[in-house]
Amino acid sequence: MIRILHPADDNGCGFIAQLDDETDTEAAGAALAPALHAGLVIYLRGDLGAGKTTLVRGVLRALGHDGKVKSPTYTLIEPYVLSRLNLYHFDFYRFAVPEEYLEAGLDEYFGGPGVCLVEWPDKASPYLAPADVEVRLVVAGTGRRLEASALTEAGRTCTRKLNSELNRPAP
């Protein structure tokens, strides 16, 4: 069961939720899906095994993708062409230096018509496009704590919608 630990502030910049298990992490991703729109950049932060790819799986399932969802640790990017939008899942964990981002030529995906979900964004800093939303997953007991922060006006719109979806009563 997803519980909001710290409700969104008045300007909708962020909130904290407790996710009890993997199912909750996928459900949080599903709640994020309706808040996505073309051009968003979302940084996914957290240690190895914190649930970043599980969250992305929830997003993709909610958007109608029924295929395999894997971490792009070795491929750098997994593109998904969906009916409503294009989603690009990045993982920069294996970068030894930030310049590898430039060498890979990935900047063409940012600022375009897709949504970019980025794991390990610090590994591509300072070259990576700035985030609209930052989602941090932290291991908390047997579950996870999700901390969502909006960094732009587009990010505030996204986090408000995500918070609203998470607060919606279960059917």
Image: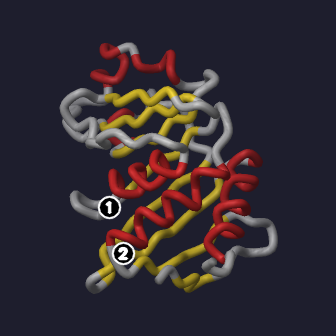
In-front residue for pair 64/72: 64
Which of the two discs, 1 and 2, labels the residue nearer the N terminus?
A: 1
Residue at 27% x, 60% y is 47
Q: Position of residue 135 (x, y in %)?
A: 49, 58
Amino acid at dot 2: Arg
What residue would you read off at disc 1? 51
Quadrant occupied by the C terminus: bottom right
Residue at 54% x, 25% y is 110
Q: Vertically, is 141 above or below 122?
A: below
Q: Residues within 10 Å of mark 1 (few under 14, many from 20)?
A: many
Q: Residues within 10 Å of mark 2 (few under 14, many from 20)?
A: many
Residue 48 located left or right of residue 165:
left
Residue at 41% x, 27% y is 79
Residue 78 falls in image quadrant: top left
Report if the CB atoms under discs 1 and 2 are less than 8 Å apart.
Answer: yes
Residue at 68% x, 53% y is 158
What residue would you read off at disc 2? 144
- The CA span between labels 1 and 2 is 8 Å
Residue 5 located left or right of residue 140:
right
Q: Residue 70 got which mark?
A: none
Q: Position of residue 75 (x, y in %)?
A: 24, 27
In-front residue for pair 90/65: 65
Q: Position of residue 159 (x, y in %)?
A: 66, 59
Q: Secondary structure at mark 1?
A: loop
Residue 89 located left or right of residue 161:
left
Q: Secondary structure at mark 2?
A: strand
Residue 65 falls in image quadrant: top left
Amino acid at dot 1: Gly
